[in-house]
């Protein structure tokens, strides 16, 4: 069971800083002077005594807007892959690194994540331009829309709000590709962890779907051979949804290890933490850094991937910080 009691002071502080915390964008890797693919004593990742998601988790998806069914199927299969067997290296093998994080009782992050419900907000209940705080109202709508509402589950529920290509979100593409947080009881009725991720395929693939699209403002030309374009091909056929998968993975890792902003992070400011996936932006394989994703696999069509999923799926997901090895790590590592 999640430990969802936090002080009013921390809640107020986090509310004030809500627009600054717990978000990321893919192309920031081009501005980073360091990467942590090799072990490093410079990273001061600490545990701050808060809960992690240690209980078997019921995950609920809110599809906001109009979605391509093929894209939905790809995302569902990634969620299923988190707790299902697949050929090594698998999504579940990747999740084993996340599971190394524990709470103060020594309980590890759960290895059981079940897709337990879906809500389709095709009416754009809160409009087509959303603030960050709107995500909480969307969760409230999904939990109160009789007769097909989602359960409001403060015990072991985790909510994903996924916005479609025609929905604009505050700071999306400009400063963020996704973020996670927790709901306020006065808005939703309970405190539950959640994450938002937007589909970037039409709005900003070069920002949020790297390496399947090239950042226009990277300051570097796309890699090429003999004058051709060597941008990596997406393993599931769509740069937007394949890029989105990695953002979903990023946010799931961080919301599981820091659901109430008082568990695992580096830095002294809980309102702007550096979390376990932030440390590894842009790293997908051994040798990565500075815009190079690292050593990954290619299928017979030249599509890039680093983990296998259910139903023969393949995905490219970024690495996360391994607290035992003290470096960024994924199951496709060469060492």
Image: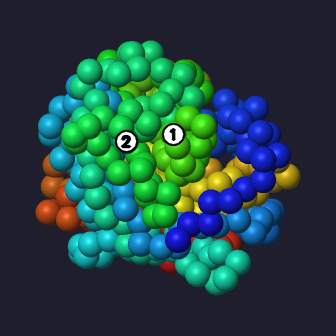
Residue 206 percent coordinates (x, y): 43, 28
Left/right of residue 98 with respect to residue 122 in the rendered view: right
- Tag on residue 94? none
Tags 2 and 1 touching, CB below 8 Å: yes
Q: Quadrant of residue 237?
A: top left
Q: What element carries label 2?
A: helix
C-alpha distance separating marks 2 and 1: 8 Å
Disc with the residue nearer the chain's start (2 vs 1) = 2
Of all residues, the one furthest to the bottom in this rendering is: 106
Residue 232 place in picture, x, y as percent? 33, 42
Disc 1, SS: helix
Residue at image point 49% right, 64% down: 155
On the question of residue 327 being in view, the answer is no
Q: Is 252 on the left or on the right of 205, as rendered? A: right
Question: Is 259 in front, or is 292?
Answer: 259
Closer to the camera, 186 or 199? Answer: 186
Vertical placement of residue 195 versus 6, above or below:
above
At 62% from the left and 60% from the top, the residue drawn is: 4
- Residue beneath disc 2: 143
Q: Name the residue under label 1.
A: 188
């Amino acid at each position: 069971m999640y430990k969802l009691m936090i002080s009013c002071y921390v809640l107020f502080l986090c509310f004030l800083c809500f627009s600054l915390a717990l978000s990321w964008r893919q192309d920031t890797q081009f501005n980073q002077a360091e990467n942590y693919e090799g072990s490093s004593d410079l990273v001061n990742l600490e545990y701050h005594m808060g809960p992690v998601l240690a209980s078997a988790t019921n995950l609920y998806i809110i599809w906001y807007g109009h979605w391509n069914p093929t894209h939905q199927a790809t995302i569902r299969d990634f969620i299923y892959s988190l707790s299902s067997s697949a050929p090594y290296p698998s999504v579940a093998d990747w999740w084993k690194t996340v599971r190394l994080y524990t709470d103060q009782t020594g309980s590890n992050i759960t290895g059981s994540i079940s897709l337990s419900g879906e809500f389709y907000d095709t009416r754009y209940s809160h409009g087509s331009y959303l603030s960050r705080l709107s995500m909480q109202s969307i969760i409230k709508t999904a939990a109160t829309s009789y007769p097909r509402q989602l359960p409001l589950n403060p015990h072991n529920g985790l909510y994903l709000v996924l916005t479609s290509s025609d929905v604009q979100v505050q700071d999306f593409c400009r400063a963020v590709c996704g973020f996670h947080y927790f709901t306020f009881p006065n808005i939703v009725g309970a405190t539950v962890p959640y994450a938002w991720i937007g589909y970037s395929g039409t709005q900003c693939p070069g920002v949020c779907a790297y390496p399947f699209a090239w950042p226009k403002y990277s300051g570097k030309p796309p890699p090429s051979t003999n004058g051709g374009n060597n941008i990596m091909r997406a393993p599931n056929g769509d740069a937007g949804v394949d890029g989105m998968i990695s953002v979903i993975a990023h946010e799931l890792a961080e919301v599981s290890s820091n659901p109430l902003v008082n568990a695992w992070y580096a830095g002294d400011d809980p309102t702007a933490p550096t979390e376990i996936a932030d440390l590894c932006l842009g790293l997908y394989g051994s040798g990565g850094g500075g815009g190079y994703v690292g050593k990954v696999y290619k299928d017979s069509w030249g599509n890039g991937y680093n983990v296998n999923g259910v139903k023969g799926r393949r995905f490219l997901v970024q690495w996360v910080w391994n607290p035992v090895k003290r470096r960024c790590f994924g199951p496709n590592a060469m060492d």
